[in-house]
Structures are given as structure tokens and as C-alpha cells.
Amino acid sequence: MSNVHTKPARHLFVNEAGWSFGFDPNKYFTTIAAALAAAAALVPVPSQASPVLIYVYPGTYAESPTMGVSGVSLSALPQYRSFLTQIAGTLTISLGAGVDRDLNHVTVSGFGMQKLRFTGLNPQKLYITDCTVEVGGDHAFLMDNPGVDTGARKSQVIAQNLTCRCTAGAFNALKKTAGDLELFHGFIRNTPDTGVAVDISGGVPSSGFCTFAEVDVDGKVACSGVAGIVLALSDVSVTGAPGVPIITNTGTGTVVIAGTSVVTGSSPAISGGLLAALVYSDIIFAGAGTGFAAGTIPVALVNFRSFVPATPGNWAAPAPNTLESAVNRLAAKVFLLNGSVPIP
């Protein structure tokens, strides 16, 4: 969260099993909500310069706490394996007023929880690591904070090793209508995976970018509004043949797909509107389903495997503009010249 070290007096502890006789009630608590309230009442108030650390012992906490003050780190203490510290409810991030999102931030690490909400109106930032969010009957992780700071920066979540799972087809494992999201190494899944696992939407000025790097998505990815997504070194897959594209863009945002496998039994696998740019490089179609829907690739397309014929007249118009299309056309011609015998 910062390079400022906290003093022991600003370390708080939570244990749902309780504490032995003689504990300090100002430092030791049995609920996360009580510890957060105590942190907010400290003097000086929590901030980047005067942070507070809250350590939570393994257990199941049947509560829905809200982090409302900047400068607080909420950390689950490990015991034998991950995610033994469970919030059997919703963790909400909704911070107070701030003019700089980078100074109005909190950190969460090591928890399992039913729902995660990044909400409110003020510009804010969340760092979240090594957490899992799993729920049925609602969105697992919802980002809808439209805050924009004085530097025109949107509220932001930076996540690493984050798992989000939704077990209800009508909802999403991840739904973002506002703010910036960067996810490095994660797992986003809808069960069944024929539903929309990632829903990226929203309008100006609240919609922000969304970047996935090394993320496995089990389910569809849907973009709308002005928002787009970057899928880098990732995987998007569904089981069987859903009959529709599994990556869609019906808005005006840019979708970037680089070094990513797309696994589906239906073609086309990817679809987008004429107003949206699709930038792609090294897509691996690993299932029976391949390709782009008609009209998906607009003039604004940038393809890092682009092909410019040295002699355009060698090709019937229109000449291929990608290596894939050139090789496919050559293969089709060789097939015919070979008497419709498959190319050895």
C-alpha cells in the first residue's frame, strides 16, 4: 500500500473465536466490522502517511463489513492452506472523499468471501491479492464506482491471484460498469460456463479500461457501451457448442486479444460491432469453433500478423491482409490443384 511502516499501536487483531482474559478491547476484536470502526476512530485517522493494519485470524465471519476509510490494510492470517479466513457475506469498498485516487486506497489480502463490491461515488483504489469470491444468485465481483479524481483518473482495482466464481447463470462472476481494472493471474468462472462470466459495460466518463494478463475465463466475455478489454496471455473457453460467439463487443470500446486461446465448439468464436476496434495477435482457436463473425473486423483493425503482398496483382481482389488469410487461400488453391485430395 505504501512504503510507510505501521507502528504496533496501529495494528489491530480479529478472532471470531474470541480472546483470552485480559485482552485490550481497543486492539482485539471478534468481528471485522468492529475492527474497521476502531481503525476509523484512531488519531491520526488512517491515511497513506499513517496506515493501519488489521490482521484477521482464520475462521468464518458471518458479517458484511464495509471498508470506508483510506489507509487500511485488511489481511487474513494463513493457517495450513489458503482461504481458511472466510467472510460469509459481502465485503464492500466505499471510501470517503478524496481528491486523488492513489491516496484514497485500501488493501485486502488472503480472504475468501461470498461477494465483493467496489462501489460508492468517490475516487478510490483497491489493491487485492490472493482472494476468492464465490456466490450463487448474484454477481460475485461488482465494480460500479464512477469516481474520477482531479487528475481525471478513474477509480481503480489492481488485483493479483483473484478467483471469482458465480454459480447462477443469470449473473456474472465479474461485472464492471465503471472504473479501471487490472487483473494479473486469475480465474473467472460462471457455472455453467455457457453464461457470461465477464460483463464489461458502462458509459462516459465512468467506464475505464480492463486488462487481463494470465487469466483463465470459463464462460463468455461480453463488452458494451464505451468500455473494452485487453486479454493477454489468457484463455477464454466454454463447454460444448453454445451456438453463439463467446467474445462479443456490442459497444464502441476496443477489444485487444493477444497470445490468448479461445476454446468453443461454435463458429464464429468472436463477434463485434462495426463501431468497435478489434486488435488481435496470436489468437489460438483451440476448439472446433473459429473465426470472426461477419462485419466484426472494421477498418480500424490493427493485426500484428498483417500481410502486405509484394505483388498485389498476384491475388484476386481483395488481396489477403493477414498471414492467416493468405495461407488459407493458398491451401484452398493447392487443394483444388491436387484434385481435391487433402494436402499431405
Image (spheres, helix red, strand yellow):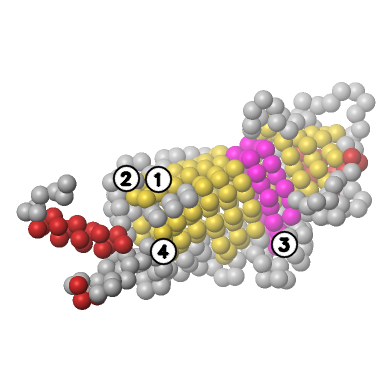
Q: Residue at x 28, y 71 (%)?
A: 309
Q: Few, some or many C-alpha atoms within 10 Å of disc 4 (few <14, some 14-19, many ≥20)?
A: few
Q: Residue at x 59, y 43 (%)?
A: 162
- Residue 279 coordinates in the image, percent (x, y): 43, 64
Residue 173 seen in the current view: no
Q: Is residue 22 magenta?
A: no
Q: Amino acid at mark 4?
A: Phe
Q: Few, some or many C-alpha atoms within 10 Å of disc 2 (few <14, some 14-19, many ≥20)?
A: some
In this rendering, the label closer to the viewer, 2 or 1: 2
Q: Which residues are magenta?
A: 105-133
- Mark number, residue 287: 2
Q: Amino acid at mark 1?
A: Ser
Instruction: State the residue position of label 4.
Output: 304
In this rendering, the label closer to the viewer, 1 or 4: 4
Label 4 and label 2: CA atoms lie apart by 22 Å
What secondary structure is found at the residue carrying circle 3?
loop
What secondary structure is found at the residue carrying circle 2?
loop
Instruction: State the residue position of label 1.
Output: 237
